[in-house]
Structures are given as C-alpha cells and as structure tokens.
Amino acid sequence: MDRRGFLRSSCQACAAIALAPALVSMESCASGSKMLAVENGMLTVPMDTMGNGNTAIVSGQGLANKLMIVKRADGTYTALELLCPHKQGPLKEVTGGLECDWHHSRFDLEGKVLGGPAKQDLKTYPVGSDGKNLLVKVV
C-alpha cells in the first residue's frame, strides 16, 4: 500500500470510530465498563458501580450528558447532571464537590451552587433502588 492509500484508509477508520455511537462509559474505581442504556425513562445502574466510594460517574445510550451518582450519608442516592447551568461547560469532581472547567462555578454534591458565575443549581434526577440496581429516573 502506498502512502496515500494508507492515509486514506486511516482517515476512514478514524471517521468510522468517531461516528460509532458510544453506548457506555462508567468511571468508577471499583468497576469496569458495563453497557448502560435508558429504557422507559429509567437508567439502571448496578449497585457495584459505586464500589466502596460515595460517587460514580455514568453515561449511556439515551443520555445527553454524564451523570454523577452520589451516595448520601443517610444511604439514599441522588444523580447530578454534569453540565454547568451557566454556559453548559463540563464539570469535574474536586475536593468536596464539582467545578466547571470553563468559568470555575462550584457546586456541592447535592448540586447546590457554592460559587458563581452560575446562579442555578445543577439538574438532579431521583434515584431509587431495587436492591441490586440503582434506578435513575431521567425523563
């Protein structure tokens, strides 16, 4: 294969990978990737996703943005959308909460604004459990 053919086939392979739908990503120290998808407005997340920690970041087919699932001290859970309400910037976990990469708005792990420029709290989703799974109502 000549150089031009190699570059053409490489670019086609990269384009195919970029256009393929990303079904799942779960970022948790305790577990590997698992297939998640929203079905009937519900995202089912295995309990072991939480591992020994109090947070897990999940995404899946049917979700526009990543979610952080937070286990509260009382044993209940909440899910936070990882999108800053100020300018829709990405959020990252920092000590004690979340911070926007773009303008440094800060939020606690309940999604409440700690520091602007954001003025609105994060979007939250209710989380239930069936004993084996966390059930995040995303619709």
Image (cartoon, rainbow, N blue to C red):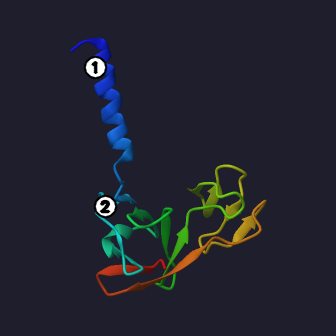
Q: Nearer the viewer, residue 61 or 43?
A: 61
Say which of 96 and 89 sits in front.
89
119 relative to 47 in the view: left or right = right
Which one is in front in this view, the residue at disc 1 or the one at disc 2? Answer: 1
Q: Quadrant of residue 112 in the image?
A: bottom right
What quarter of the picture does the N terminus occupy?
top left
Above or below, 12 relative to 49: above
SS for dot 1: helix
Query: Mark 1 near mark 2, Cβ–Cβ under 8 Å?
Result: no
Amino acid type at mark 1: Phe
For label 1, the residue is 6
- Furthest residue in direction left, as rendered: 1
Comes first in the chain, label 1 or label 2: 1
Where is residue 49 shown, x and y percent of the image? Answer: 35, 68
> Tag 2, which secondary structure?
loop
* Residue at figure coordinates x 61%, y 73% from the top left: 123
Q: Position of residue 93 (x, y in %)?
A: 56, 58
* Amino acid on which the number 2 mark rests in the picture: Ser
Q: Residue at x 30, y 58 (%)?
A: 33
Residue bearing the label numbered 2: 31
Residue visible at 64% across and 54% down? 89
Residue 128's mark?
A: none
